[in-house]
Amino acid sequence: MSNELVPVQAGRLVRLKDVGRNEFWLQDWLAADLARLGLGPLALVEQEQTQVGGGNLDILAAAGDTYYSIEVQLGEVDASHSFRVFDYWARNRRRFPNKTHVAVLVAESTGGRFRIALEELAEYVPLLVVELRSWQGSSEVVIVPDLVVTNDSVDVSGTPLAVTAGQSRTETDWKDALTEDAWLFHLDFAEWAREHLGPIVVDYSPKSYIGIRVGRRVWAPLWPRKDGAQIYLPDPDQSRGDESPAFAHFRELLAERGYTLNWQTTYNAGANPVAIRLRRNDLNDTAVHQLLEATYRAVHPGAGNWSETASVERQGAAGESPLELESDAGEGVPGLADLPDLD
């Protein structure tokens, strides 16, 4: 590796139209290499995606099971593009109901009239707003992405824009901000998961939650409370829209122990719909262990339907037909059985 210093030159902020480029050029430039957005390794699904009822989405991209509806414009973001990106995002949610969907608005500038509206909307829907700033040097123009608005439920940690989002935190930031009980809860949660479930990574970079990750996926985002955390878990049956048999089973099981399990599809576009409030002492409860194990299993590639697996395991143990079984958690969920205690 050379020890020579990289040359430093003065540059100036320019608009793409001033250097002879238009919106179609920018769309093609991004589609040719989606890493230029700074959102990590995205794959192009379709460019100029035709929508039923009219209109064309500039770019539909994907990362795993997450689809990104991307609308691109030159200059200052306007009302038309701001609404259009939500229209295309909503249509793709209906077209591909088994995917997680994120709206991405890309513009050269977002500091004008509609910035406040975008920031407020991002509190409730999975929206990312990326500014593409163009800097002209002596012989070239460099386009630099900057993530200026993001919804906390959209995981951008590990992407080039995670630092520029203005929302990254560190372990020290969280320790300074939390109560002792909340801090110890997240340590106990992570330790138990590693010991009883498998590999996890604690991600401190999000602004509003501590992410407990399994690979790229945020399995258990911990939204800290004074004595614990609110946690949003994936559904063991892989459902994102409707309450599943597994959810009904665990809701009944946990209700008997004094817990409330809720179904919440607005968090993370439905990817983690199972919400539960836990405190440090709750990590000793075997019913909580069973829920965590089932949801951890669900985030692994090729994971099957938990209810069907539990039914087969119960059938093998009892030598009975699943249709003859009744749920230990209550009526209306045939064929489900409690998992063995983990401790």
Image (spheres, rainbow, N blue to C red):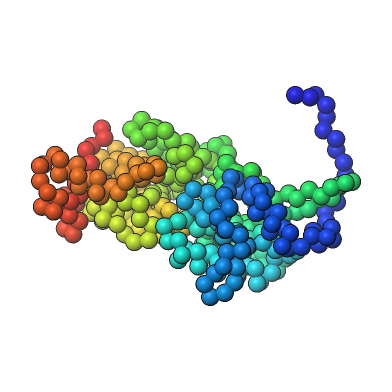
Q: Position of residue 54 (x, y in %)?
A: 57, 74
- Can residue 33 be seen by looking at this rendering? yes
Task: Report whether 20 appears left or right of 110.
Answer: right
Q: Position of residue 60 (x, y in %)?
A: 57, 58
In this view, the residue farthest toward the bottom is 53
Q: Position of residue 236 (x, y in %)?
A: 32, 49
Q: Quadrant of residue 129?
A: bottom right
> Which quadrant of the rendered structure holds the C terminus?
top left
Nearest the eye: 343 or 142: 142
Q: Which residue sits at x=29%, y=57%?
A: 244
Against 91, residue 283 (above or below) is above
Q: Quadrant of residue 199?
A: top left
> Which quadrant of the rendered structure holds the N terminus?
top right
Q: Which residue sits at x=85%, y=38%?
A: 8
Nearest the eye: 153 or 92: 92
- Can residue 37 be seen by looking at this rendering? no
